[in-house]
Amino acid sequence: MSVLVSHPHVAAVSVGLANALEREHKLAGYYTGIAFSLESQMGRLATRVAGRAPTLRNRLLAEIPPERLHAGRLLEVCARLGGRVAAALGGRRPVYDALFSTHDRAVSMARWPGETTAVYAYEDGARRTFERARRRDLERIWDLPLPHYLTIEETVRDESRRWPGASPSSPDPEPAWKRATKDAELALATKVSVASAFTKRSLERLDVRVPIAVGPYGFPIEGFAPKSAPPSGPFKVLAVGTQDLRKGTPYLLEAWRRAALKDAELHIVGSLRLTKAFLDRYAGLFVHWPPVAKSELAHHYSGADLLAFPTLGDGFGLVIQEAMCAGTPVVTTPCGGGPECITDGVDGWIVPPRDIDALVERLRAAAADRDGTGAIGRAARARAERSTWREAGTAILRALDL
């Protein structure tokens, strides 16, 4: 087995997989955007520059040798700039779409190592690559990072009915061209890789006939150190990420209002995609922070007693792992990567989706036993240390039988 891994912007999951393949001498090549092998001269130069440009750090690859790294640096820069220009001119395809489609086209036309027996590519960036792989009779592994788009659309429609007036716009389905791309990628795949059982179920309901492997992501312990001391001051609950219907934000806000905790604060970090009229119902009950860089999130995690992530439909939910790395326990639902990261009552909590009463009960219990909540957080960090990307990458290979 010799696997070509394709991803346009060095996502952690693609790097973790490529590293695991390289350790087992099964990596044909890693095709991505801006990236540097630390074994190369450019990599050493980029390492020095990264001291002044921290965003470069995750583009420095320690385990992938130069001969197997195919970095389309200029391509990524041009795709991002082109996407921004098109958006400014009224185009309907965001930067993300421009980046993935451009990368897919480039990889489909690139020179592939002769020993390649399989191609691993990601949703929205796999169609042309898979078409070429099929012509060469190669295995085609499709990574689906979110639940299938039909599940997401159904969830948002249902929540719009449950919370009328909460969303600033009517739920829009994926554009027809994008749905066609996703459908074609799935039809071309010989295996599917997902990070959670929830995402797997979103495919099984469509009667997908190819194998679907569940491989949870690795914990990013290098980026989020454990808190050095328990949080002081008011009991603090944190919510991180885009706040909208799919993320279950209305349930969190309503649970927080009903819980009526004394000497407690709810801090929300991220974009609020809910109407002002809806948010005004909870005015004064929470502190809002605009989106911040990942490097700044560590401070928020460390200062919190609990992360609340009542999602209704996530492929995984990276904030779960980030908080656990910081030693902050998480309360979440089964509608994402919670069951893959948390043993309920041991290193976090899983509550039923849309269950406001269960969320109220958990918030009150965590605040009433702050020391116990801290102990759960320490157990969360211990679990993170046992499941880094090194272990996760190898587990994904085993799940996919690579």
Image (cartoon, rainbow, N blue to C red):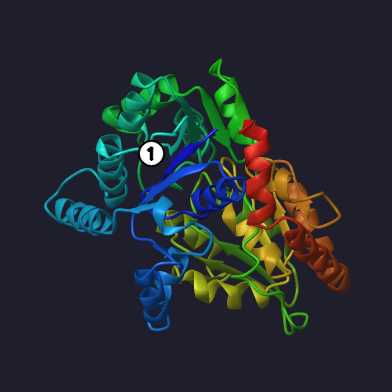
- Is 294 or 39 nearer to us in this picture? 39
- Is 14 or 282 nearer to us in this picture? 14
Q: Looking at the rendering, in which quadrant would you find the C terminus?
A: top right
Q: Residue at x 56, y 15 (%)?
A: 209
The number of numbered discs placed on residues in the rendered structure image is: 1
Res 80 → quadrant: bottom left
- In the rendered view, tell whether residue 303 sits above or below residue 341: below
- In the rendered view, tell whether residue 213 sits above or below residue 296: above
Q: Residue at x 29, y 39 (%)?
A: 111
- In the rendered view, tell whether residue 191 sits above or below residue 50: above
**Residue 87, image x and y in percent?**
19, 52
- In the rendered view, tell whether residue 170 sits above or below residue 259: above
Q: Looking at the rendering, in which quadrant would you find the N terminus?
A: top right
Bin the neighbour count of mark 1 within 10 Å (Cα to Cα): few under 14, some 14-19, many 20 and up: few
**Residue 265, image x and y in percent?**
66, 73
Q: Residue at x 62, y 48 (%)?
A: 393
Q: Residue at x 71, y 45 (%)?
A: 340
Res 293 → quadrant: bottom left
Instruction: Decide if residue 342 is on the left or right side of residue 39.
Output: right
Res. 356 visible in picture: no
**Residue 383, image x and y in percent?**
78, 59
Which residue, given by chain and number where applicable, does mark 1 sit on? Answer: 113
Classify mark 1: helix, strand or loop: loop
Res. 326 visible in picture: yes
Q: Amino acid at mark 1?
A: Pro
